[in-house]
Amino acid sequence: MTEINKRRHPRCSKDTSITFVYFNQKKEYQALSRNYCRSGMYFETEKKLQPGLIIQIRPVDCASDQQAGMALPYYCTKVLPGEPSCLELKTFVHAQVRRCTRISDVGPYRYGIGVEYVSPAV
């Protein structure tokens, strides 16, 4: 039996460090995005998020954010020279949590989170 791909856009499977905050709050949490596309993202984090929750996401600049003490080392992956870049990761986005799955009982990656970007009303 073949699995049907329901995704609207192709995914980029490049690990990228991100931070997220609850909508209209200041405390940042760190996470590792495992894949993303034009309409959403899957990331792993230690924080359990309820489906329906609106969050703000931004990519982490590991070089400068680590120096400032804002990026935990295990969330920053090494980028190899000549690696193709994925252009779909937004620099700052609002997203709605669609699913949250417990993936581990230990370590920084306890929950897998699927989000859909919130499109602005026009």
Image (spheres, rainbow, N blue to C red):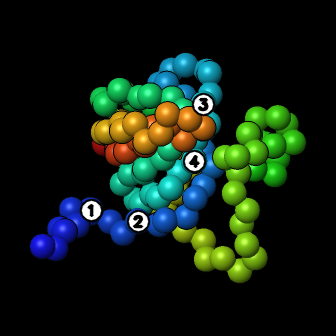
Badge 2: few (under 14), some or many (20 or more) residues near its Cα, within 10 Å? some
Q: How far from the left and from the top, in percent, is residue 41?
A: 42, 51
Callout in the foreground (2, 4): 4
Q: Is residue 60 above or below residue 10?
A: above
Marks 2 & 1, CB-CB < 8 Å contact = yes
Does 56 appear above or below 92? above
Please say if the residues under marks 1 and 4 sit with CB atoms less than 8 Å apart.
no
Distance in Å between CA atoms under marks 4 and 3? 10 Å
Q: Which of marks 1 and 4 is nearer the N terminus?
A: 1
- Mark 1–mark 4 distance (CA, rounded to whole Å): 21 Å
User: Where is the N terminus found, in terms of image quarters?
Assistant: bottom left
Q: What residue is at 38 percent from the left and 51 percent from the top? A: 40
Residue 29 — which label?
Answer: 3
Under mark 1, the amino acid is: Arg
Q: Which amino acid does label 4 sit on?
A: Leu
Q: Residues within 10 Å of mark 1 (few under 14, many from 20)?
A: few
Q: Where is residue 56 in the image (x, y as percent from the top left)?
A: 50, 34
For marks 3 and 2, the one nearer the N-term is: 2
Viewed as shown, does residue 8 lie left or right of 44?
left
- Proximity of marks 2 and 4: CB atoms separated by less than 8 Å: no
Query: In the image, what residue occupies the spot 56% across and 35% down?
Result: 106
- Please state, as top left, top right, bottom left or bottom right, where the C terminus lies in the image: top left
Locate residue 84, reporting x and y percent: 61, 77
Rounded to the nearest whole Å, what is the CA distance between mark 3 and mark 2? 23 Å
- 4 and 3 marks in contact (CB < 8 Å): no
Query: Callout 4 environment at 10 Å: few (<14), some (14 to 19), or many (20+)?
Result: many
Snapshot quadrant of residue 118: top left
